Amino acid sequence: MKLFAMFNDIVRNLFRKPATRNYPYEKRPDFPGTRGRLMIDPTNCIYCGICAKKCPSNAITVTRKPDQSWQFDRFRCIVCAACVEACPKKCLRMAPRTEKYPDEE
Ligand code: SF4
Ligand code: SF4
């Protein structure tokens, strides 16, 4: 009886899709409503600092003098997207979780 039940499982699993996916070649798409991760396109950034002022977790640091710089601490980010909404030059966007930062492999 147990053998028969096992045989049924074997036959059923022969024709099923695998329960796992071939990660990292096949990545799970984001769930609906997932905000992803913050990305910047610095080409239009005017270093106004509005994004840093709007950020509730102080994850963004913008300096104008002596050098212009835009820095982001990804471990402080709570993915609220307040900076994205506030940026007057539309430099910021929420990207899918699978998109890599420039310094990631
Ligand atoms: S709000 Fe936009 S333009 Fe201003 S510093 Fe931030 S990213 Fe740059
Ligand atoms: S998404 Fe929210 S927490 Fe993250 S950097 Fe932008 S304002 Fe700050």
Image (cartoon, grey):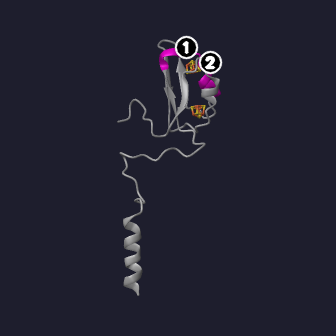
Dominant secondary structure of the residues highlighted in magenta in the image: helix
Q: Which residue in the protein does label 2 denote? A: 88
Q: Which of the pair 94/59 is nearer the observer?
A: 94
Asked which secondary structure carries label 2, the reply is: loop
Of callouts 2 and 1, which one flags the residue occurring earlier in the amino acid sequence?
1
Q: Is residue 45 above or below residue 74?
A: above
Q: Which residue in the protein does label 1 denote? A: 46
Q: Quadrant of the N terminus?
A: bottom left
Q: What stretch is highlighted in magenta?
A: 42-54
Q: Is residue 46 above or below residue 7?
A: above
Give x and y (percent) for residue 54.
Answer: 64, 27
Give x and y (percent) for residue 23.
Answer: 37, 49
Residue labelled 1 has its Cβ within 8 Å of some atom of ligand 1: yes
Asked which secondary structure carries label 1, the reply is: loop
Give x and y (percent) for residue 95.
Answer: 51, 33
Q: State which quadrant residue 102 falls in.
A: top left
Q: Which of the pair 27/78 is nearer the observer?
A: 27
Within-10-Å neighbours for mark 2: few <14, some 14–19, many 20+: some
Residue labelled 2 has its Cβ within 8 Å of some atom of ligand 1: yes
Q: Is residue 50 magenta?
A: yes
**Rounded to the nearest whole Å, what is the CA distance between mark 2 and mark 1?**
9 Å
Q: Which of the pair 55/27 is nearer the observer?
A: 27
